[in-house]
Each structure stands twice: as structure tokens, then as C-alpha cells.
Image (cartoon, helix red, strand yellow):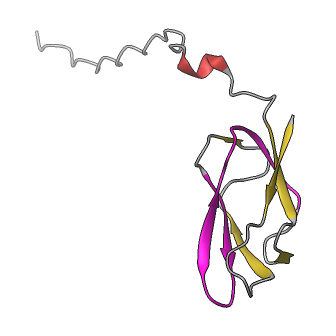
Amino acid sequence: MAFEVTIPEVGESITEGFLAEWSQPDGAMVAIEDPLLVLETDKITMNINAEQAGQFHIMVAEGETVQVGQVVATIDTDVTAPADRDEKPAATTEPTPAQEPTAPEPA
């Protein structure tokens, strides 16, 4: 299911803001409370954090003016992080150090 990331109300008289920066790249896996974007208005600059976990999809370009309530991204909550990242990596063999050539002993 896609969860919509919207621009929140930040004050009675504020109706729009400036999407200053995306904190996550498009397609990234995000967790609840991960920072998603930086919103600037005439009065404040604030971080907007993820309310859901899943795969993050950007819908509005950085630097755009956005309206309160506007959907700027989605989080696909059906996509989860790969489970294999908790698994131990396959054992690797380390190369043996090269032996330094030894000089022949004088006879």
C-alpha cells in the first residue's frame, strides 16, 4: 500500500513552503522517523520525518514551491528491506602474504 507524504500545516497563515532538500534518495528504504525532507517557509525551516516504513518514492523536485496538504512523495509499505542484510556474509579466504625472496647464503 502506498502511504502519501504530504506537506503539513505549520501555522495558520502559512499556505506554502519551499522544498529545500530531500534527505533520502528516490527508491531508498526508510524507517519510521527517518528524515525525508527539509521544508522552508517564511517563518521556519523544519524536517519532515517518515510516518511509515517502506520504499520511498519522490514526486516533486527539490527546489519546488509546495502547498500545505500537497502530496510530495509516497512510501510503499508493501516493500520491506531485504532480510539477508542481517545474515552473515559468506566466508572469504584471505590471500596468504607473499613471502619475501631470500638471498642465497654464501658458500
Q: Give above or below for 87 relative to 28.
A: above
Q: Main secondary structure of the magenta part?
A: strand
Q: Give above or below for 3 relative to 94.
A: below
Q: Nearer the viewer, residue 68 or 103?
A: 68
Residue 37: image location, x then y, percent: 68, 63
**The C terminus: image quadrant:** top left
Quadrant in the rendering for residue 87: top right
Q: Which residue of the protein is positioned furthest toward the left in this rendering?
A: 107
Query: Residues in magenta?
Result: 35-59
Residue 35: image location, x then y, percent: 60, 56
Residue 96: image location, x then y, percent: 37, 13
**Residue drawn 87% across the image and 60% down it:** 71
**Residue drawn 62% across the image and 88% down it:** 43
Q: Which residue of the protein is positioned furthest toward the bottom in this rendering?
A: 42
Horizontally, residue 5 falls left or right of residue 88, namely right
Quadrant in the rendering for residue 23: bottom right
Q: Nearer the viewer, residue 105 or 35?
A: 35
Residue 65: image location, x then y, percent: 84, 80
Q: Give above or below for 18 relative to 57.
A: below
Q: Is residue 81 magenta?
A: no
Q: Is residue 54 magenta?
A: yes
Q: Nearer the viewer, residue 104 or 20?
A: 20
